[in-house]
Image (spheres, coloured by chain):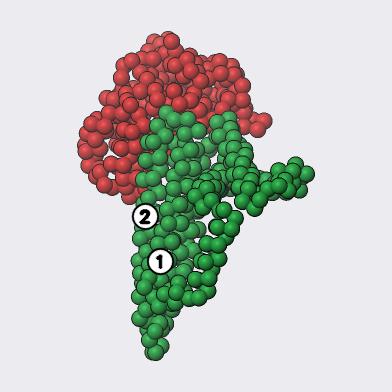
Amino acid sequence: MLRKLMKHEFRATARIMGPLFLIVLVLALAANLALRFLMESDTFLPNLLGGLLMAAFVIGMVALAIMSIVLMVNRFRTNLMGDEGYVTFTLPVSSHQIVWSKIIVSTVWFIATGVVEAIALLVCFFNLDVMRDIFSSEFFRQAFHALHELIKEYGLNVPAIAIELIVLCLLSCAVLCLEFYAAMAVGHSFANHKGALSVLFFFVFQFAIQFISGLFFNADEFEHMFNAGMNGMQAFHQMMAIFIGMELVIGAVYYVITTFTLKKRLNLQ
Amino acid sequence: MAILECNELVKAYGHTPALDHLNLLIEPGHIVGLLGPNGSGKTTLIKLANGLLTPTSGQMLVNGMVPGKDTHAIVSYLPERTCIPLWMSTRKLLDFYQDFYADFRRDRAEEMLQHLSIRMDQTIRQMSKGTREKVQLIMVMSRAAKLYLLDEPIGGVDPATRDYILNTIINNYDPEAAVIISTHLIADVEQVLDEIIFINQGQIILQSSVDQIREEKGMSVDALFREVFKC
């Protein structure tokens, strides 16, 4: 059933994200052409048009990132807390499956958004002299050389770092969803002022998590996790493990709040 | 076994009880009218049976089970207002119901949609209010469920649509199943009911067969309702 929930969640979201991806990529192409031809021109009108196209591209990139989060929030609000909730909550599925389907699909869209934005940037600057200048510059060469030295000097395990960063990135996406879901689930469990209470709970949860994290990082136990004998790389891995562990704990807390509220305090009106 | 059972069921919103120690037993094989004035607790009772609300105290059982994903598989629910996603086309809605409900009979749904000349590529948003309600009812009645919970299925539609809706309910109803129709428009549904439940201020005040009312009281359900709930 999780698979089916995800299939329909993708259907519901792809109709918005798909066209947005296309628009951003077209804008990237337009921005590339604008940089190449229009902005090189000496006359006013092509310059203005080129400037406008570049502005549209930048706005498109920002809007896409914002939309992926707005869509995640909005899907939860309308599909579960709004009228559609009557249909969703009477499906023969558990609330765990519903929440997981939303987390997984939103995370996929966050990652896809990142990939599309990266592609859009590449398209925008493709084959431009400015890019060639940057990549062939002395600074870039030296920076690359320094990175190489760093890997050799400290024995950087690049694949391990990459895996840690990917895991942390995926977890952060899921936790981002759950932060909003928990606030909305609790906010909507009240009879009145559901929207305002959702916003209030979002900040209350944020404050609580920041406060507890602050206490943890200031605690003696945290310092004891790093002993003097560690080299830089070991300390880095230790730090990553702590970050991943913290995201897991925070995510689990939000998940329990969300599913418990949806199960025990559901209050559709 | 009863398809729907309530034991000392209480649901309170704040300090106001919507259902007050309600006891009820409904057997399969009947079309039951859940009748009561506005605010009597009809919708609350139906929402509790669907697990959309949780009881304050007491017990609600559907086919012997607490409402949850297992009961959702055998209960077909028509909410009081249109709740199907507006962005979906009729075809996508059919896919949706077919994917989630093993008892969904797509051919029957398509036949009814065709009869009403509803296009497959038309989105729910493009439809009129009456058409949306018909489409939602078609989805609900195209399931071979054990229990149908229909909350105000004829509220807010014209008399011709009312007839269509009631005919759809009768033609698609499996005699082994139970149908519970909540409404205050009694004269319109009376013809299709086997049994009635009068509910007021969160309590059952009468549960009887329609024939019994006619024989013993010598009046229609509508007339009895007007007498019992006289303002």
The colour one sees for chain A in the rendered image is green
Q: Is residue B32 above or below residue A177?
A: above
What x and y, as percent, mark residue A70? Answer: 50, 53
Q: Is residue B37 above or below residue A235?
A: above
Query: Of B223 and B37, which appears nearest the observer?
Result: B37
Q: Is residue B23 above or below residue A202?
A: above
What x and y, as percent, mark residue B88? Answer: 34, 45
**The quarter of the displayed image where residue B181 is located:** top left
What's the residue type where badge 2 is placed?
Gly
In front: mark 2 or mark 1?
A: 1
Chain containing the residue with disc 1: A
Mark 2 lies on residue: A18
Query: Of B78 and A130, which appears nearest the observer?
Result: A130
Examine the rendering and report whether any part of residue B215 can be seen: yes
What's the residue type where badge 1 is placed?
Leu
Classify mark 1: helix, strand or loop: helix
As drawn, the label of residue A122 is 1
The answer to whether marks 2 and 1 sit on the same chain is: yes
What x and y, as percent, mark residue A218? Answer: 76, 48
Query: Of A73 and A218, which appears nearest the observer?
Result: A218
The colour one sees for chain B in the rendered image is red
- The numbered mark, 2 or 1, whose residue comes first in the sequence reads 2
Examine the rendering and report whether any part of residue B20 can be seen: no
Chain containing the residue with disc 2: A
- Which residue is painted at 47% across and 47% down in the image? A107
- Which residue is painted at 61% across and 47% down in the image? A237
Classify mark 2: helix, strand or loop: helix
